[in-house]
Amino acid sequence: MHNSIKRAVSIVIAAIVLFSLPCGSIFARTHIDIDKKCSITVDIPDTWEDLYTVDFPVELYRVADVDENDVYTATKQFAELAKSISDISSKTTADDWEKMAKTAADIADKGSLTADEKIDVSNGRGTVTGVKTGLYLVYAKPANSARFGYTFVPYLVSAPNNEFAMTGSGSDSWIYDDIDIELKPEQTGLMGSLQINKTLKTYNTALGEPVFAFDVEAYDRDGNVVFSDIASIRFDSTGAKSVVIDNIPAGSRVIVKEVYAAGSYQVTSSDSIETQIVAGETADVDFTNDYNDKLIYSTGVVNHFEYDGTGWEWVQN
């Protein structure tokens, strides 16, 4: 009986000790050395090979101070998050963390805040040292490669951190050096434009208005057709005219061929030109035609093809 009472008392004391720990200490039992500096490394997942070609900064904003018991207190600039941060516990869900990170990113943007630290990412990796202890917003602004645009999910990370808090298993000892962060990118295709310039040196008014047609095909790095269209330019006098084609995938290789010249006109330049599409820019190709002294009346109707996600659909202009 006496032993049973002692055992019951021990269990109660253990329970009191467990539940009186500061909220953050659920993740680690040792105290934090708040004067010790940390280092943080940012990585890009191996599956995002294209993103390895882009150099870009990742900004760190100190959202909260941390004390030796792993209790967070919002910094002045992020006071709007004070309650959410003070409520952090083992019951804080992934959605809660995501909402806090998004709010912190909005605060940083609206207030035009200056980052406390910056990590320069190159070839998929970047590191910063001498980081003060605390809770940080990891915020990478949009970045572009030659073909794609990238945005990144903002999130929060503590410095120091520990393996158990990050993975749910392993050691709960505090990690000060080489705290590893894997960015979460989202990708969208970028587009560019093509301008076809046509110069007609000589014009015979008796033969009507000549139409010149061009086949435009764009290929990705694997040689797959990613864009196909037919463009035309009509003349009613000598001179130069142009046509612009938009929404061609950036980074693609484009071949433009003059596939139809009005019967009395001949191509005096190359009839096939290759160029590269750059995101947000307009590539130029130039063609020249001249009257060939033949009396052939001609005109034309131009059609083009649009890709609907499953195949190419013929559309008459």
Image: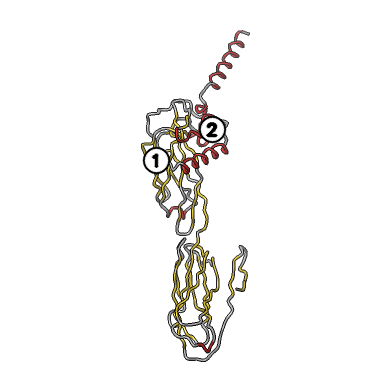
Query: Which residue is the extreme one toward the top?
Result: 2
Q: Which residue occupies 56% across, 15% down? A: 10
Q: Which of 308 and 25 is in front in this view?
A: 308
Applied colour scheme: secondary structure
Q: What residue type is labelled 2?
A: Ser
Total marks shown come to 2
User: Could you tell me which quadrant the N terminus lies in?
Assistant: top right
Binning the other alpha carbons within 10 Å of mark 2 as few (below 14), some (14 to 19) or many (20 upward) gives some
Of the numbered discs in the image, which one, if any, rests on residue 258? none
The percent coordinates of residue 157 (x first, y second) are 47, 37
| Residue 209, image x, y percentages | 53, 83
In the image, residue 98 sits, relative to residue 300, either above or below, namely above
At which x and y percent is residue 81? 51, 34
Q: Which residue is more in the foreground, 28 or 300?
A: 300
**Looking at numbered disc 1 in the image, what kind of residue is underneath it?**
Glu
For image coordinates 54% across by 67% down, the residue present is 227
Q: Mark 2 or mark 1: which comes first in sequence?
A: 2
- Residue 84, label in figure: 2
In terms of depth relative to the viewer, which is nearer, 283 or 250? Answer: 283
Camera-side mark, 2 or 1: 2
Instruction: Name the image quarter holding the C terminus.
Output: bottom right
- Vertical comparison of 264 with 12: above or below: below
Q: Measured along the vertical axis of the image, is residue 44 above or below residue 2? A: below
Looking at the rendered structure, the secondary structure element under dot 1 is: strand
Reading the image, the residue beneath label 1 is: 117
How far apart marks 2 and 1 lie (CA) works out to 23 Å
Mark 1, other Cα within 10 Å: few <14 / some 14–19 / many ≥20: some
Residue lying farthest left? 130
